[in-house]
Amino acid sequence: MAATTNDTTEERRRRVLLGPLPAGFLRADSDGPAESVDVDYEAALALQQQLCGATMPPAGPPLTARLSVTIVQAKLVKNYGLTRMDPYVRLRVGHCIYETQTDPSGGKTPKWNKMIHCLLPPGVNSIYLEIFDECSFTMDELIAWTHIQIPAAVLNGETHEDWYPLNGKQGDGVEGMVNLVLSYSVGPAAVPTFPPVLVVPSTGMGYATMPMYPAGTPHTYPQQQPQQPQQPQPITEEELAQIYEMFPSIDKDVIKSVAEVNRGNKEATINSLLQMSE
């Protein structure tokens, strides 16, 4: 019995394959061509790369188109009411509406010198502007309005200043003029925009809107959480060149000095120069 067992063991050992394994070891036999294995491998590799690419974060921050509108002043043909009007401006860009401060007793020559940074949605190439007279005991009265096409030069990066005719009770284009400075930029949304106001139906002329004000505080925006003050970005040579174009009558050395006094803050520099040129 022991001899039979030893013979069986020796026979099994003789059948053991010694040396390197063949190329087809443990591979299932297939009736198809051998190239199908390579095709399946390439398809699996492509699927893996596609899935990995879908989870990768985008390269860099998203870009945002931003329109800057400086509402300088207006010259109106008539003062409506018994006293001098208190005008302010509402600006609509896309579906958002922004406001300037009120010029008390501005009358027919109100001045605001207000720069508004607003997002420019894709496909929007015009803005709508309204001038209201702030009233204490009645609804604010719409004085004048206009629809302005954004000049192509502005969308190409140039700063554009012009006087635009106003429509109103006197007729189209004869209610007065408004002075605007327009500029356009594309980049990360680093400059905060002003909060929009609420649009409500009205029976008056033009677009009627009502700002979202806190109770008992007219023409002030909702209080926001206090934030840490940020240092203003130093003004660039390109922005300085744009300011030169906006104020050709002021010496360039004076403009540089004003920019240094305002610590390179572009908006503060423009406002200071506007006050100097009045």
Image (cartoon, rainbow, N blue to C red):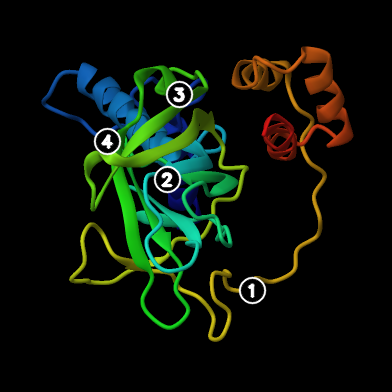
Of the image marks 1 and 3, the number of the one nearer the N terminus: 3
- CA gap between label 1 and label 4 equals 32 Å
Local SS, label 3: loop
Residue nearest the viewer, comparing 59 with 221: 221
Q: Residue at x 16, y 29 (%)?
A: 30
Q: Is residue 31 visible?
A: yes
Residue nearest the viewer, comparing 140 with 202: 140
Of the image marks 1 and 4, the number of the one nearer the N terminus: 4
- The amino acid pointed to by label 4 is Gly
Q: Is residue 71 left or right of residue 4?
A: right
Q: Is residue 42 left or right of residue 56?
A: left
How many residues crowd mark 3 within 10 Å: few (<14), some (14–19), many (20+)?
few
Answer yes or no: do the residues labelled 1 and 4 have beta carbons within 8 Å? no
Q: Position of residue 184 (x, y in %)?
A: 49, 29
Local SS, label 1: loop
Question: Going by the picture, which residue comes out furthest to the left?
Answer: 31
Residue nearest the viewer, comparing 250 with 3: 250
Q: Quadrant of the N terminus?
A: bottom left
- Which residue is tagged 1? 223
Q: Quadrant of residue 46?
A: top left
Answer yes or no: do the residues labelled 2 and 3 have beta carbons within 8 Å? no
Per the rendering, the mark at residue 8 is 2
- Which residue is tagged 4? 123
Q: Position of residue 208 (x, y in %)?
A: 28, 64
- Which residue is tagged 3? 21
